Amino acid sequence: MDSLALASGGETMASLLETPLSEAGSFDILSLISTASPGAVNFFTETVLKQLDRFESVEARIAVTGESVGGRSSFIDAIRNVPDNEAGACPAGGSVTEPTNYKFPSTNALQIWDLPAIGSPDFSAAEYLDHVAFHRFDAFLILSSDRFTENELLLAKAIQKRQKNVYLVRMESASDPLLPGGEQREASPNDGLKEQLPKVFLVTSWRPGSLGFEELLLDLAQDLSELKKRAFLFAVPCVTSKIEQAKKELMMNEIWKVAARPILVNMMPIPVLSDMCGMTQLVATLTSYRKAFGLDEDSRGRWAKRVGRKPEEFSSAVTSTFGLAVCVSAVKKQIAKAAQSGRILATLLNVVPVVGQMGSATLSYRHTLSMLEAAVGEMAQDSERLLQKVLPLK
Ligand SMILES: Nc1nc2c(ncn2[C@@H]2O[C@H](COP(=O)(O)OP(=O)(O)OP(=O)(O)O)[C@@H](O)[C@H]2O)c(=O)[nH]1
Ligand SMILES: [Mg+2]
């Protein structure tokens, strides 16, 4: 960070780079660039561009384990919002003998793995963890439909000892498929082994909108590193308003980087030849946000199947421009609209336009940022309406 501390603008840039994604907010990037030294600007530019590239290339891996018939397959489908019997669904019955990766429909940045069931009388947690190559996983969920067995608790401790995150998940026995709400009951692990054990979550795959499911998703996300937390939260379905708000917050805090991208790419000492043009990048970002909010046809279709409804029944929930479709012409139109309305973020009112026009005039930083802010806000509203239709509160 030394090269950044050369000018006052450089110091602000350094602190910007160290700010977690979840707290970054929006910044007057153009005036910062105008006041920092060339060295600081170069370092800043490279760092932000690298981070943007890593949004898609990061791989977070969550492992699901436990005794056989503990509810792993059902949970793996619930957390991915994949209906039973759909291509890619985790087959019920017949535990896997090797760790098996199940992809999320909307992203490659998060993977969920079904691990072989544990529980033979001569179970060794150390051998089991070696066998599944535990190093590659960021978090472990131990699922149980009943009291946690001694082997499950031994495994939890062995995972903790290896400095990995582990969560005990007790599957709730209530049987109404996909009813909303869901009361959370006290769920305590077996007496005697209680000390130093991870928290227990009471969850049912049939009610992903319940408090226990939400709490598990939020805790899991919170314990991951910044980029993996983003990958996780973007990939999981919007099962509650809190989850949807967490996604919205991440997006609102990163859109300044997305908007600044074309400017930063142009400022690189060696031009990035293979870089997507600004408009293509914006379309890709908005498409990924639309999917993260579950507004695309695939996500809506999967919800419909999971709750036994027709996709058309959810159509009226989605009304925003980008909730309905993302395309170049809509992006251009919305940027032009933002430019006309002069709607800009409060933090950018005193922007200093030191950087000349980079490519199309409509891609100006302020207007792009304003467009993105409106787009995220409107898609979040779509997502909230969709949620109320898919998993209505009692
Ligand atoms: N009550 C309740 N039952 C569940 C839940 N999830 C799954 N089950 C039931 O538990 C049984 C096993 O579910 P699976 O999801 O196949 O469990 P599994 O751990 O993958 O099982 P194996 O792969 O055979 O070891 C099935 O009868 C499910 O219907 C849940 O959240 N609540
Ligand atoms: Mg299974």
Image (cartoon, rainbow, N blue to C red):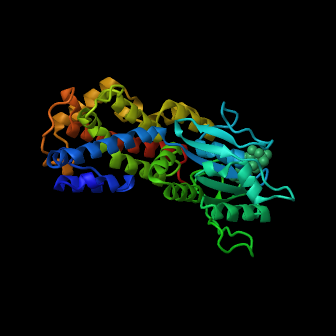
Q: Residue at the spot x=64%, y=66% of the render?
A: 185
Q: In what quadrant does ligand 2 lie? A: top right
The image quarter in which residue 169 lies: bottom right
Q: How many marks?
A: 0
Which is nearer the eye, 198 or 99?
A: 99
Q: Quadrant of the C terminus?
A: bottom right
Q: Residue at the spot x=34%, y=46% of the render?
A: 254
Is residue 330 visible to the viewer in this orientation of the structure? yes
Which is nearer the eye, 114 or 155?
A: 155
239 vs 174, left or right, is left
Which is nearer the eye, 265 or 106?
A: 265
60 vs 328, left or right, is right
Q: Residue at the spot x=53%, y=48% of the render?
A: 239
> Farthest residue in the top direction?
329
- In the rendered image, residue 145, in percent from the top left (x then y), is placed at 75, 57
- In the rendered image, residue 87, in percent from the top left (x then y), is placed at 66, 30
Which is nearer the eye, 101 or 270?
A: 270
- In the rendered image, residue 274, in percent from the top left (x then y), is placed at 36, 26
> Farthest residue in the right direction?
121
The image quarter in which residue 281 lies: top left
Q: Quadrant of the N terminus?
A: bottom left
- In the rendered image, residue 82, in percent from the top left (x then y), is placed at 62, 38
Is residue 145 visible to the viewer in this orientation of the structure? no
